[in-house]
Structures are given as structure tokens and as C-alpha cells.
Amino acid sequence: MGEPVRVEQREGFWRVVLDRPDRLNAFDRPMHGALAEALQSATKAPDCRAVLLTGAGRGFCAGQDLPAVAAEGDLGRLLAETWNPLVRLLRELPVPTVAAVNGIAAGAGVALALACDIVLAARSARFFMAFAKLALVPDSGASWHLPRLVGPARARALALLGDPLAAEDAERWGLIWRAVEDSQIEAEAEAVAGRLAQGPTATLVATRRLLDDGLARAFADQLTEEARLQAELGRAADYAEGVRAFHEKRSPRFGARG
């Protein structure tokens, strides 16, 4: 057996591949540790300015490996020690993130994708909120993301019924950004990650945080936070480069991530 997570370095970004295709990339403890290690390494690598997360084989991620759960006993402790730190780490990376859902995403595998900044899916991909079929509630952040992305009514139906959601419907509902042809998912996702890697990294991460935190802020407080961030970013070299590029009618060349 090889490593459960494979890291491939591209120009400006890392492609991180969940690599247990025989288990539809379902997670056990070693896989949790391997992905956390890969993401922590990405935070320290100055040449990594975006992360692309995808799966090997015909699935993106089937969530938690159920046979491995039998040895855990306390599911709350399992979440506290594995999934929760993992999705927080992914959500708080100092670089933008892309999920390429190349096939089936189920349970916490859906939550893993939704923790990324931009989610693309192959047209053949399906999203299963399978928790209720196991007599469990949505976890790993799924209960937070679903109503915010698709609205309360659709979130309840997805969570209570556990029916599969096609990629095109996921795009139409706003669960993901875009559904693409199966043959194009890898190229499209790498193109998006490459664009993000060339962007102003600190600004992109600040934008993620502003959008997330704004959901819980009053309008006046959000205006204040926008002004604070603009003042901070307006003093940075990337802003000066963006202005120069605009006047010179060329693409900006933003500096290394801060």
C-alpha cells in the first residue's frame, strides 16, 4: 500500500490527491494524518500559493471509512481529533483552495469539498449527504455550509432524505461553483488553481475571511471591517503593482505570498 495522500507540485500551487481509490478515498486515521501533514507543509512552503484538492480513481471522497469507525467507539471524540481540525485547517490555509470533485462525494467527503474556496465537479459526480442513512447528523462543517449555500429548505431535504445530488443540480443550487465535463475536470481545476496562484495571495485570503465573517456581522460592522482591510491592503506592494499594471495596460505581477 502506498501513501494515502499524494502531493504533486505544480508551478505556483500544490495538487493534493486523496489516494485510497479502493475505498473511494474514505478516511481512516492514517489518511487524516497524511492530509493534515500535507496541508501544514503547504502553509510553510513559499512556492505554494494555492492548493488543489482532488481524489484518485472514481471517487472524490466517501467520508469516513466505516470499518475503521468500529474501532473508535466515541464518534464525538473521532470528530474532535480528526475531521474538525482537518476542515478548520483547510478553511484557514494562508492560500486559496480549490476542490476538484472528480466523482462520488459522500458524508464528510462533501464537507471536505465545501471547506475549499472554489469547488468544481465532474458532470458525473454525485453529492450524498448520507448521514441520516446511518442515523447520524451532518458533521465536519456540513451543517454550517449547507443552509448558507443552498438555503434552509434545500439543506433540510438534502440532510433528511440523503438522496444523491447531481453535479449540474449542485451548480444550479449554488452548492458548488461549476460542473464541467468529466474529461475537463482536471485541466479546468488546474487552470483555476494556477490563476489563484498568480493572484495577490494576502488579498484573496482576506476576501475569504471577509465573506465568511460577514455572514454573522451587522451591515455597519461589515462596512467598518471592509474599510480596515482596504487600509491595510492599500499599504501593501501588491496594491501598488495592481495600480501600475492597470495604468500600463498589462497583467499584474504580484509578489510572493506574505
Image: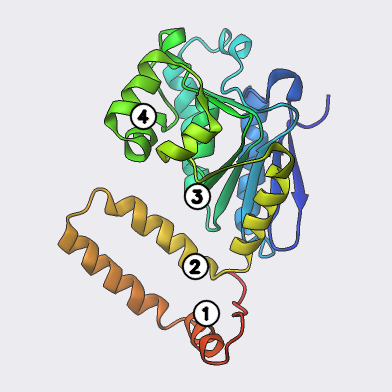
Which disc, if any, is residue 202?
2
The structure residue drawn at horizontal position 74% and vertical position 40%, both measured from the top left corner, is: 183
Return the disc, 1 or 3, that comes first in the chain's sequence: 3
Kind of residue at badge 4 = Ser
Picture quarter with the N terminus: top right
Q: Pointers 1 and 2 in contact (CB under 8 A)?
A: yes
Q: Is residue 33 left or right of residue 143?
A: right
Viewer-nearest residue: 224 or 191: 191
- Can residue 86 be spotted in the picture? no
* Helix, strand or loop status at disc 3: loop
In the rendered image, residue 13, in percent from the top left (x then y), is placed at 68, 57
Give the Cα distance between marks 2 and 4: 28 Å
Kind of residue at badge 1 = Asp
* Helix, strand or loop status at disc 2: helix
Picture quarter with the C terminus: bottom right
Which disc, if any, is residue 117?
3
Give the Cα distance between marks 4 and 1: 36 Å
Give the Cα distance between marks 1 and 3: 21 Å
Q: Label 1 crowding class (10 Å Cα cut-off): few <14, some 14-19, many 20+?
A: many
Give the Cα distance between marks 1 and 2: 9 Å
Residue 16 versus residue 48 in the image, above or below: above
Return the disc, 4 or 3, that comes first in the chain's sequence: 3
Which disc, if any, is residue 238?
1
Q: Label 2 crowding class (10 Å Cα cut-off): few <14, some 14-19, many 20+?
A: some
Mark 4 sits on what residue?
A: 143
